[in-house]
Image (spheres, rainbow, N blue to C red):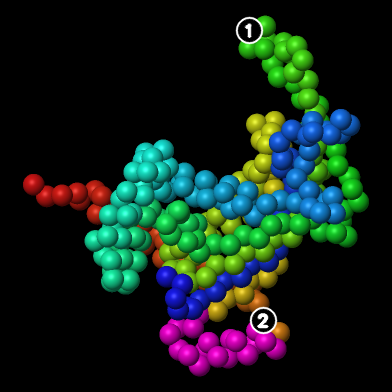
Amino acid sequence: MFDVFKNRLEITGTLTTVTALHIGVGRSTEPIGSDLPFLKDALGRPLIPGSSLKGAMRSRLESFLRGINPELARDPGELTSSEQFQIINQIKNDYKGDDAALTQKLIEATDWVSQVFGSPWLAGKVQIRDLPVVPEAWFGQYQERDGVAIDRDTETAADGKLYDLQVVPARTPFRFHAVVENAEEWELGLLAIGLHQLETEQIPLGGGRSRGLGVVRLQISAIYWFDSEGDPRRLLAYLQELVAGSRQPLSPEQAAALRQDWVEALVAKLTTASQRQSVGPRR
């Protein structure tokens, strides 16, 4: 899957909190401080793990695909880890020595979302880097939010269950950087839908989401796209641009057209898969 470089999509932008955000690290062991502190970098500034954003996007896309066909995004609870690896090991034994056939069978045994975001036996194609806060916009303005557990019987505050959590306020910007390599057009279409969900504030992050925390908005500032199209000369020119630092991002019109093409490729693939499911085996 990654033995030959084919294409690369790179996206940069800003992820801004619309409401307060809490990304926790568990309970604090400090005698003085918040019960539930925010995740911080080495300099004490807030940090959003790339895995948190990637996981939230993956979960949203899985729910969409399951609405079309549950097989496209299988529930991890359907099979235990040992059962999954038993299936994969059987495939490896059946196709030992034939790398091309083995790779193809592993892909066929993997649901669509895992083909894009990864599984224990298949590397993901999407990399979302940790999101540091924009230094110029950060002045150490953490906020403390009080919380209390409710006794469901009395519908009042439970004794000894008062706590506080640390949040970053609304309008705090974080730097966003994602890279996708060797993706098919339909896979890029799936990613485009996930990015649109972030752009329209549809994917909340962190804890306290039922209380209104965690609403974020993505603003894409630059999209870089390269497709070798199997031509070594194109790849050589691309490498020269990288070294010289002369590569240019797509124009807004080019980016919009590509995203539309990718989404149409996804819709076509989904339509074909739905038709196959509706036909089913003939008697």
Q: Does the magenta-highlighted stretch encompass residue 232?
A: yes
Residue 77 shows up from this direction:
yes
Q: How many marks?
A: 2
Most extreme residue toward the left, as rendered?
Answer: 283
- Secondary structure beneath label 1: loop
Q: Say which residue appears at 43% left-offset and 59% top-offset.
A: 122
Part of the protein shown in magenta: 227-244
Q: Quadrant of residue 195?
A: bottom right
Residue 70 coordinates in the image, percent (x, y) = 36, 44
Residue matched to label 1? 153
User: In the figure, is residue 250 to the left or right of 27?
Assistant: left
Does residue 248 lie above or below 93 as drawn?
below
Residue 248 - label: 2
Most extreme residue toward the top, as rendered?
Answer: 154
Q: Does the magenta-highlighted stretch encompass residue 89?
A: no
Q: Amino acid at mark 1?
A: Asp
